[in-house]
Image: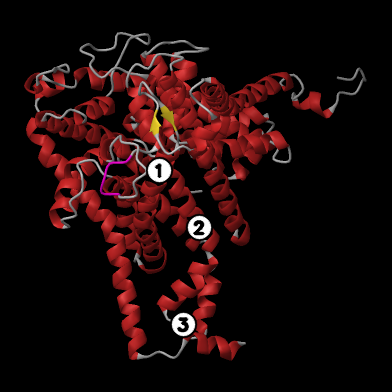
Amino acid sequence: MQQGATPSAKEVLGVAQRHFGEKIIKALLFLAALVSILITVGIVFSLVGETLAFFQDDAVTVKAFLTGAEWSPLFSDPEFGIRPLVQGTLIISAIGLLVAVPLGLGTAVYLSEYARPRVRAVVKPTLELLAGIPTVVFGYFALTYFTPKILNGIFGLDVAVFNGLAGGIIVGIMIIPTVASIAEDAMASVPQSLREGAYGLGASKRQVATRVVFPAALSGIVASVVLGASRAVGETMIVLIAAGQVPTTSLDPRQPMETMTAFIGATGKGDVPTGSTGYKAIFAVGFTLFVMTLIINAIAIRLVRKYRQVYE
Amino acid sequence: MTSESVQTFGAPSPAGKLRDWAFVVLLAVLTSVGLVVLAALLIDTAIDGVPSLSFDFLTSFPSAFPARAGIESAVMGTLWLMLVVAIVIIPLGIATALYLEEYADRSKWWNRLIEVNIQNLAAVPSIVYGILGLAYIVRGPLDLGRTVLAGGLTLSLVVLPVVIITSREAIRAVPPSIKEGALALGATQWQAIWRQILPSSIPGIATGVILSLSRAIGETAPLILVGAATFVAFNPTGLDSAFTALPLQIFSWISQPNEDFQSLAAAAIVVLLVMLIMLNAVAIWLRNKYQRRW
């Protein structure tokens, strides 16, 4: 503050005295925001630290980890090739996407272009319910109903009790709301003038939906699928319960397979002693999973930003 | 150009009409699959689980004998976890949201970093948070052991990004004119936030908090890693108590080969779903009752 005879505007309004408290509040809020950075740092450090320790183990080499075709870290003669787990994750996620992409995008087109407001008001929140169901419940459903009654019963596929197919399909059902809501968002943000222009040129409603709105919303639609893929890759409970815990390089989804997440869950379930190879293997697999989802998420975030920039 | 486009769409024809109709039917079918599966899931679980529901089931502890097993300790564990999660995420989530919406200068790189980081955290698989919880909360720096506090903190990390994102939306929904009016009347930044923006955005924030809690209730994977025990025949007595939780108890029963345990799992799922529906009903009620249109 200045020592002049005439008081400054700040003093008259009484702002000056309160300024210090304001700064403290801003600093506190900033600290709270920093916690989120701290969480990321914590994730990275905890994963990297134990992963490095994992690779210092005599039985483990980076080459065998990345290229080996057998995963049996808890055996007395352990093998550490992560390929079976990555393959299980990719197959189950692919099955999930094969289910979720047509169903999710079909739902999005229907809700954005066709559904009457009344229908929309019922269908949308009901689908959101699907997103709110805990995944352990989906796992139960896959194991006790979908595999025996639908896959074996109605389709007669002769699948094992634990199998990749049921896990993948139910993961796909789980991510329908993710795909549908983001894709619908993207389609809704396509300007009405584009639709009207197409109608003016004689297009039917179907042609507007498929040839105008869909392509115009494409980056958002791709983002919805990418985010769905990220959720499928990271899903744990459904695959842990319904797909089994047998790491395999077999491509047959009717048989049990193990994903990266299922391995982490199954191994972490018991009391793994700190420092044991099994304990470290959790972190090495977790790190691989984290890097995979990080890449997928980065792509999705970039795509979402792109479609927002185009029309908003 | 114009005439070409007209040709692209083609003249209306009976075959085109048929295709239009078939397309609508296809979309309706695709949309209904999700709804049908949801219905099948709810009905199947109810059929399996409701017969095992009883007062005894709610007030007994887990047991090796299916007929005597119950979920009291699991429900109490879940309630304790919710308490911890609520205490952690409400202040932390709102503070972060306020910082990002009201104070952060987006031209500064660290603010953009915080923002992208939160988007990213929201998409990190929950089991990765479980690994973090195992390494740094149960063991390592915090060394809390397999306690209610460790489980609650881990779940808080899982849902924190959701609270931040929904709170930001609620804060953003308050028109700038409200804040500008307060500032023009001589309020400081914080006075405008505390007396105008926060009260107006509380319903939206509360909805977000409740939805996050309902997500935390159902999270299983992180708790598996944080090592909550599944056979806990006592209620938690405090933050440093061992615990089990409803989804963990469900998972443990599903893993039993004995069929009787499967129906116990279904019964516990029914209880879990009822808790979720009640939470969501509160959220919807809050939103409808207090939502303001500006």
Q: Quadrant of residue B105?
A: top right
Image location (x, y in percent) of residue A287: 51, 31
Residue A303 sits above or below residue B206 on the image: below
Which chain is mark 1 on? A
B274 sits left or right of A289 in the view: left
Neighbours of disc 1 within 10 Å: few (<14), some (14-19), many (20+): many
Image location (x, y in percent) of residue B165: 51, 38
Image location (x, y in percent) of residue B250: 23, 29
Which residue was labeled with disc 1? Answer: A89
Q: Main secondary structure of the magenta part?
A: loop
Q: Which residues are magenta?
A: A253-257
**Magenta-span inclusion, residue B10:** no
Cα–Cα span, label 2 and label 3? 25 Å
Question: Between tags 2 and 3, which lies in front?
Answer: 2
Which residue was labeled with disc 3? Answer: A203
Q: In the structure shown, which secondary structural element does the residue marked by tag 3 occupy?
A: loop
Q: Quadrant of residue A7?
A: top right
Q: Is residue A176 visible?
A: no
Which chain is mark 3 on? A
Image location (x, y in percent) of residue A183: 46, 58
